[in-house]
Amino acid sequence: MSSTKHVQTEIDETLYSMLKALSLREKRPIKEILRDAIEEYLRRNASLTKEEISKDPIWDAFGRVELKGRKTSHDEDWGVVEWQSH
């Protein structure tokens, strides 16, 4: 990964117990298992997500709008925009 973002969330005890057991069995950290699960989930939903994103009206303005003197394409943190541009 070229750059990473810190993401934090809560899960219930049952999910945590399952993750902990998997982590011990596979001898891998929980965060690695979670990253793999997120990547797999996004891969499965990539085509639908890309289609929905492409229909968003922001793309009509993207690259032509300026915020505080900067082009939107140069903003540091545009979330999905950053993901789609790779």
Image (tube, rainbow, N blue to C red):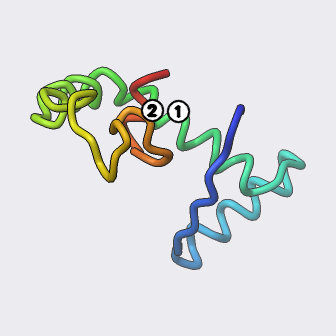
- Distance between mark 1 and mark 2 Cα atoms: 15 Å
Residue 40: numbered disc: 1
Up/down of 33 relative to 45, above or below = below
The residue positioned farthest toward the front in the image shown = 69
Task: Compare residues 9 and 55 and report the one nearer the observer.
Answer: 55
Label 1 packing within 10 angstroms: few (<14), some (14-19), many (20+):
few
Task: Compare residues 42 and 53 and report the one nearer the observer.
Answer: 53
Quadrant of residue 16 within the rendered picture: bottom right
Q: Earlier in the sequence, mark 1 or mark 2?
A: 1
Residue visible at 39% across and 26% down? 84
Give the structural element (helix, strand or loop) at label 2: helix
| Left or right: 4, with 65 as reference point | right
Residue type at tag 1? Glu
Where is residue 5 shown, x and y percent of the image? 62, 52
The residue positioned farthest toward the bottom in the image shown = 13
Where is residue 1 shown, x and y percent of the image? 71, 33
Quadrant of residue 63 within the rendered picture: top left
| Front: mark 1 or 2 | 2
Task: Compare residues 68 and 60 and report the one nearer the observer.
Answer: 68
Residue type at tag 2? Trp
| Left or right: 42, with 67 as reference point | right
Where is residue 14 shown, x and y percent of the image? 57, 73
Up/down of 47 relative to 2, above or below = above
Task: Check disc 2 and report the residue beneath it.
Answer: 83
Residue visible at 64% across and 45% down? 35
Residue visible at 53% across and 43% down? 38
| Left or right: 59, with 57 as reference point | right
Task: Compare residues 23 and 7 and report the one nearer the observer.
Answer: 7
Where is residue 47 shown, x and y percent of the image? 30, 21
Give the structural element (helix, strand or loop) at label 1: helix
